[in-house]
Image: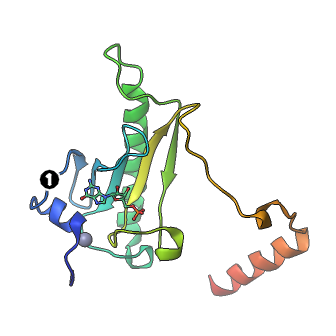
Protein backbone atom coordinates (compact mmCIF):
# COMPACT_ATOMS: atom_id res chain seq x y z
CA UNK A 1 0.00 0.00 0.00
CA UNK A 2 1.47 3.37 -1.01
CA UNK A 3 -1.21 5.89 0.05
CA UNK A 4 -3.28 5.67 3.20
CA UNK A 5 -6.11 3.18 2.68
CA UNK A 6 -9.03 3.32 5.12
CA UNK A 7 -9.82 -0.38 4.71
CA UNK A 8 -6.19 -1.34 5.44
CA UNK A 9 -6.38 0.90 8.53
CA UNK A 10 -9.53 -0.96 9.62
CA UNK A 11 -7.91 -4.35 8.93
CA UNK A 12 -4.83 -3.30 10.94
CA UNK A 13 -7.03 -2.26 13.88
CA UNK A 14 -6.00 1.40 13.49
CA UNK A 15 -9.52 2.55 12.55
CA UNK A 16 -12.80 1.40 14.07
CA UNK A 17 -15.20 -0.99 12.38
CA UNK A 18 -17.77 -3.59 13.36
CA UNK A 19 -16.51 -6.94 12.08
CA UNK A 20 -18.80 -9.81 11.20
CA UNK A 21 -16.13 -12.29 10.03
CA UNK A 22 -12.41 -12.54 9.40
CA UNK A 23 -10.00 -15.21 8.14
CA UNK A 24 -6.50 -15.09 6.61
CA UNK A 25 -7.71 -13.97 3.19
CA UNK A 26 -10.97 -12.09 3.69
CA UNK A 27 -12.80 -9.90 6.20
CA UNK A 28 -16.39 -8.71 6.43
CA UNK A 29 -17.39 -5.56 8.34
CA UNK A 30 -20.36 -3.21 8.45
CA UNK A 31 -20.52 -0.31 5.97
CA UNK A 32 -20.37 3.06 7.72
CA UNK A 33 -23.14 4.47 5.49
CA UNK A 34 -25.54 1.57 4.91
CA UNK A 35 -27.89 1.44 1.94
CA UNK A 36 -30.16 -0.40 4.39
CA UNK A 37 -29.31 -1.62 7.92
CA UNK A 38 -27.30 -4.84 7.58
CA UNK A 39 -25.06 -3.53 4.76
CA UNK A 40 -21.75 -5.44 4.92
CA UNK A 41 -18.49 -5.00 2.97
CA UNK A 42 -16.45 -8.10 2.13
CA UNK A 43 -12.80 -7.25 1.44
CA UNK A 44 -9.52 -9.05 0.78
CA UNK A 45 -7.08 -8.78 3.70
CA UNK A 46 -4.16 -8.09 1.33
CA UNK A 47 -4.39 -4.55 -0.08
CA UNK A 48 -5.69 -4.79 -3.64
CA UNK A 49 -6.89 -1.61 -5.34
CA UNK A 50 -8.58 -3.08 -8.40
CA UNK A 51 -10.37 -6.29 -9.28
CA UNK A 52 -7.73 -7.05 -11.95
CA UNK A 53 -5.09 -7.26 -9.17
CA UNK A 54 -7.11 -9.63 -7.00
CA UNK A 55 -5.93 -13.24 -7.10
CA UNK A 56 -8.65 -15.74 -7.98
CA UNK A 57 -8.38 -17.62 -4.67
CA UNK A 58 -9.09 -14.44 -2.70
CA UNK A 59 -11.91 -13.64 -5.15
CA UNK A 60 -13.44 -17.06 -4.58
CA UNK A 61 -13.17 -16.68 -0.82
CA UNK A 62 -14.79 -13.21 -1.05
CA UNK A 63 -17.77 -14.70 -2.85
CA UNK A 64 -18.01 -17.62 -0.42
CA UNK A 65 -18.02 -15.22 2.55
CA UNK A 66 -20.50 -12.91 0.80
CA UNK A 67 -22.89 -15.87 0.39
CA UNK A 68 -22.60 -16.56 4.12
CA UNK A 69 -23.18 -12.88 4.93
CA UNK A 70 -26.31 -12.94 2.76
CA UNK A 71 -27.54 -16.04 4.61
CA UNK A 72 -26.82 -14.38 7.98
CA UNK A 73 -28.65 -11.19 6.98
CA UNK A 74 -31.67 -13.25 5.88
CA UNK A 75 -31.50 -15.31 9.08
CA UNK A 76 -31.40 -12.26 11.36
CA UNK A 77 -34.54 -10.91 9.67
CA UNK A 78 -36.38 -13.95 11.05
CA UNK A 79 -35.26 -13.49 14.66
CA UNK A 80 -38.09 -12.84 17.13
CA UNK A 81 -36.00 -9.95 18.50
CA UNK A 82 -36.43 -8.07 15.18
CA UNK A 83 -33.11 -8.25 13.34
CA UNK A 84 -32.53 -6.37 10.10
CA UNK A 85 -35.35 -6.11 7.58
CA UNK A 86 -34.53 -8.38 4.64
CA UNK A 87 -36.73 -9.69 1.84
CA UNK A 88 -33.93 -9.89 -0.73
CA UNK A 89 -30.18 -9.29 -1.01
CA UNK A 90 -28.06 -7.31 -3.49
CA UNK A 91 -24.36 -7.87 -4.22
CA UNK A 92 -22.57 -4.88 -5.74
CA UNK A 93 -18.94 -4.34 -6.67
CA UNK A 94 -17.69 -1.07 -8.17
CA UNK A 95 -14.44 -1.59 -10.09
CA UNK A 96 -13.06 1.76 -11.30
CA UNK A 97 -14.17 5.36 -10.97
CA UNK A 98 -16.69 5.14 -13.84
CA UNK A 99 -18.32 2.22 -12.04
CA UNK A 100 -18.64 4.27 -8.86
CA UNK A 101 -15.60 3.00 -6.92
CA UNK A 102 -14.67 5.45 -4.17
CA UNK A 103 -12.46 3.35 -1.90
CA UNK A 104 -9.42 1.91 -3.68
CA UNK A 105 -9.36 -1.42 -1.89
CA UNK A 106 -11.56 -4.06 -3.54
CA UNK A 107 -14.85 -4.60 -1.68
CA UNK A 108 -18.02 -6.50 -2.37
CA UNK A 109 -21.15 -4.83 -0.98
CA UNK A 110 -23.78 -7.17 0.44
CA UNK A 111 -26.98 -5.45 1.53
CA UNK A 112 -30.53 -6.42 2.37
CA UNK A 113 -33.47 -5.17 0.33
CA UNK A 114 -37.14 -4.95 1.07
CA UNK A 115 -40.18 -3.78 -0.85
CA UNK A 116 -40.56 -0.02 -0.55
CA UNK A 117 -36.98 0.64 0.67
CA UNK A 118 -36.79 3.42 -1.93
CA UNK A 119 -33.58 2.34 -3.70
CA UNK A 120 -33.65 2.11 -7.49
CA UNK A 121 -31.14 1.51 -10.24
CA UNK A 122 -31.42 4.18 -12.96
CA UNK A 123 -30.84 3.19 -16.58
CA UNK A 124 -29.99 5.55 -19.45
CA UNK A 125 -32.42 5.72 -22.43
CA UNK A 126 -29.96 3.45 -24.33
CA UNK A 127 -31.03 0.56 -22.13
CA UNK A 128 -34.53 0.69 -23.59
CA UNK A 129 -33.33 0.46 -27.23
CA UNK A 130 -33.44 -3.24 -28.09
CA UNK A 131 -30.14 -4.89 -29.11
CA UNK A 132 -30.19 -7.26 -32.06
CA UNK A 133 -29.00 -10.87 -31.75
CA UNK A 134 -26.16 -9.87 -34.11
CA UNK A 135 -25.02 -6.99 -31.84
CA UNK A 136 -25.01 -9.31 -28.86
CA UNK A 137 -23.15 -12.08 -30.69
CA UNK A 138 -20.54 -9.59 -32.00
CA UNK A 139 -19.85 -8.37 -28.48
CA UNK A 140 -19.53 -11.95 -27.22
CA UNK A 141 -17.07 -12.64 -30.06
CA UNK A 142 -14.90 -9.67 -28.96
CA UNK A 143 -14.86 -10.97 -25.41
CA UNK A 144 -13.86 -14.46 -26.58
CA UNK A 145 -11.01 -12.88 -28.59
CA UNK A 146 -9.39 -11.36 -25.49
CA UNK A 147 -10.20 -14.19 -23.02
P1 LIG B 1 -17.64 2.21 -3.27
O1 LIG B 1 -18.38 3.43 -3.77
O2 LIG B 1 -16.15 2.39 -3.37
O3 LIG B 1 -18.13 0.94 -3.89
O4 LIG B 1 -18.05 2.09 -1.77
C1 LIG B 1 -17.27 2.48 -0.68
C2 LIG B 1 -18.06 2.13 0.57
O5 LIG B 1 -17.19 2.23 1.68
C3 LIG B 1 -19.25 3.08 0.83
O6 LIG B 1 -20.45 2.31 0.92
C4 LIG B 1 -18.88 3.76 2.14
O7 LIG B 1 -19.99 4.00 2.95
C5 LIG B 1 -17.91 2.77 2.76
N1 LIG B 1 -16.93 3.40 3.62
C6 LIG B 1 -16.18 4.49 3.33
N2 LIG B 1 -15.38 4.81 4.38
C7 LIG B 1 -15.63 3.88 5.34
C8 LIG B 1 -15.12 3.67 6.66
O8 LIG B 1 -14.29 4.41 7.17
N3 LIG B 1 -15.60 2.60 7.34
C9 LIG B 1 -16.54 1.77 6.83
N4 LIG B 1 -16.95 0.78 7.59
N5 LIG B 1 -17.05 1.93 5.59
C10 LIG B 1 -16.61 2.98 4.85
ZN1 LIG C 1 -6.12 -1.22 1.48
Q: Residue furthest top?
A: 80
User: Does the closest atom of ligand 1 sit within 8 Å of the Cβ of label 1?
Assistant: yes
Q: Residue 73: x and y, percent?
A: 39, 34
Q: Quadrant of the C terminus?
A: bottom right
Locate residue 48: give its quadrant: bottom left
Residue sitting at x 53%, y 75%: 98
Q: Residue at x 47, y 30 (%)?
A: 86
The colour scheme used here is rainbow
Q: Is residue 53 above or below residue 62?
A: below
Q: Is residue 20 left or right of residue 41?
A: left
Residue sitting at 82 percent across and 79 percent down? Answer: 138
Disc 1 crowd, CA 10 A, few/some/many (<14, 14-19, 20+): few
**Residue assigned mark 1:** 16
Point 35% across, 24% down: residue: 83
Q: Position of residue 18 (x, y in %)?
A: 20, 45
Q: Nearer the viewer, residue 72 or 13?
A: 13
Q: Is residue 55 left or right of residue 125?
A: left
The answer to whether residue 143 is above or below residue 31 is: below
Indicate the secondary structure of the residue bearing disc 1.
loop
Q: Quadrant of residue 39?
A: top left
Where is the N terminus found, in terms of image quarters? bottom left
Ligand 2 shows up in which quadrant of the image? bottom left
Q: Is residue 5 left or right of residue 72?
A: left
Q: Position of residue 45 (x, y in %)?
A: 24, 64
Q: Is residue 88 above or below residue 61?
A: above
Along the viewing direction, whichever of 123 and 53 lies nearer the viewer = 123
Most foreground residue, 22 or 9: 9
Amino acid sequence: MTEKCIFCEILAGKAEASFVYRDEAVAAFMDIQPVNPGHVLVVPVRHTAMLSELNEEDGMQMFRVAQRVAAAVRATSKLPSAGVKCEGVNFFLADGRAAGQEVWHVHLHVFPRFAGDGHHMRFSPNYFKPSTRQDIEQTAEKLREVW
